[in-house]
Image: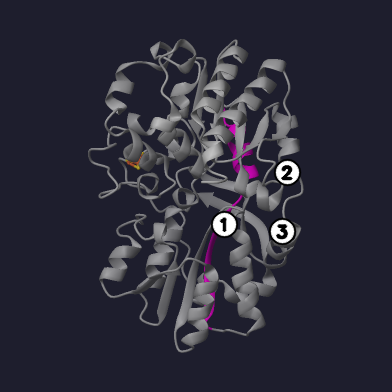
Amino acid sequence: MKFLDEYRDPEAARTLTRAIAQLTTRPWTLMEVCGGQTHAIVKYGLDELLPREVTLLHGPGCPVCVTPIEKIDAALELAARPDVTFCSFGDMLRVPGTDRDLLSVKAAGGDVRVVYSPLDAVKIARRHPARQVVFFAVGFETTAPANAMAVYEARRERLDNFSILVSHVLVPPALEAILSSPRCRVQGFLAAGHVCAVMGYREYVPIAERYRVPIVVTGFEPLDLLQGIYMCLKQLEEGRAEVENQYSRVVARDGNGPAQRLVAEVFEVTDRNWRGIGRIGMSGLGLRPDYRTFDAERRFALARRDGAAEDSECQSGLVLQGLLRPPDCPAFGTRCTPDHPLGATMVSSEGACAAYFQHRRGTVGAQHAVPKDRRGTEADGAGRSPSER
Ligand code: SF4
């Protein structure tokens, strides 16, 4: 398939892994901050193709996973109201709140609907003026333009029965929070290509300079990721800390101007809680004063819920910060599975725990038994081809 097969070519992957092996002279730790990239790395076994010196950590790149539990609880309260039609992307439905999830509210008779776009929710509001329609607006910079458009349209049409429950988060402040932590081991980042397609990558330049970390804007296919890793390692080996763009077929330095203007028209930057991580200053988006009438929390006068507790057994906060590999969680695959998830990282299609459960369930025991520094790599002939996995 054009635009896919050429980025999954096994021979090109072998060439890149050999180049990475030749380049690497000492231990390096990189982090990707995108659930799509995490799944591609785990699915294609890219981490296992790398030299033993290179460690990949998974960061807080799954938007569903970082949506704070108090927002899920707010969604549950709204969805249970008899006057509300609650619209959401499908992967939010099974994310556990404090004591249940949206699917259980739906099963109990709540009007919960899966939509594929926030504009679908606007359509429902238009068709059903007697219903209050609430859209669950979560995600990174990638989904912000469409959510902004929905609110913009609702305001233009004077739809007074449409509102959004906002939980938008921003990637650059999350990188800074990770780098500022005393436990940080990250020496280079793969930045998410789709986020940069919207926002460009100028915001990453001061971060790379301040923390002396290379940041490479990277795509999602196996060869994109291997090339992004190569570019990041090359900078590290050469003592450089710059922002580079591996995903130039999609991402421009300044991003998508019209999308950014629409986001800036509707949203403003605000503090935001991240599930499992805590509060990060100026790390999210909230509605600007002109658009606050579309804020569901204000419209329904929801009480603040700060401090809602995660399941005590779930360590997804450590997973989201790259401090714990999912298979190292004692509940992984036993008490916590996609059918009975204890945390959001096991539910979401972009969650790191779900990635390991889906693609490595049968092999994590063996990987545990053999520390990475004694596992084979592509460089010494024992690695696995990404195309066969
Ligand atoms: S495996 Fe389950 S319990 Fe463990 S961190 Fe992941 S989501 Fe939480």
Q: Which residue is mark 3?
A: 260
Question: Mark 3 falls on what kind of element?
Answer: helix
**Which amino acid lies under the numbered mark 3 shown in the image of this protein?**
Gln
Dot 3 and dot 2 residues touching (CB under 8 Å): no
**Which amino acid lies under the numbered mark 1 shown in the image of this protein?**
His
Magenta range is 161-182
Q: Position of residue 175 (x, y in %)?
A: 61, 38
Q: Position of residue 241 (x, y in %)?
A: 72, 26
Q: Is residue 314 visible?
A: no
| Crowd rating for badge 1 (residues with CA inside 10 Å; few <14, some 14–19, many 20+) | many
Q: In which image quadrant can residue 188 be found?
A: top right
Q: Is residue 158 above or below residue 269?
A: below
Most distant residue in the front direction: 1
Q: Which residue is mark 1?
A: 168
Using the image as rendered, state which of residue 382 and residue 215 is in the foreground. 382
| Crowd rating for badge 2 (residues with CA inside 10 Å; few <14, some 14–19, many 20+) | some
Residue 146 left/right relative to 113 = right
Q: Which residue is mark 2?
A: 203
Give me the residue at 50% from left, 51% from top.
63
**Which amino acid lies under the numbered mark 2 shown in the image of this protein?**
Glu
The CA span between labels 2 and 1 is 17 Å
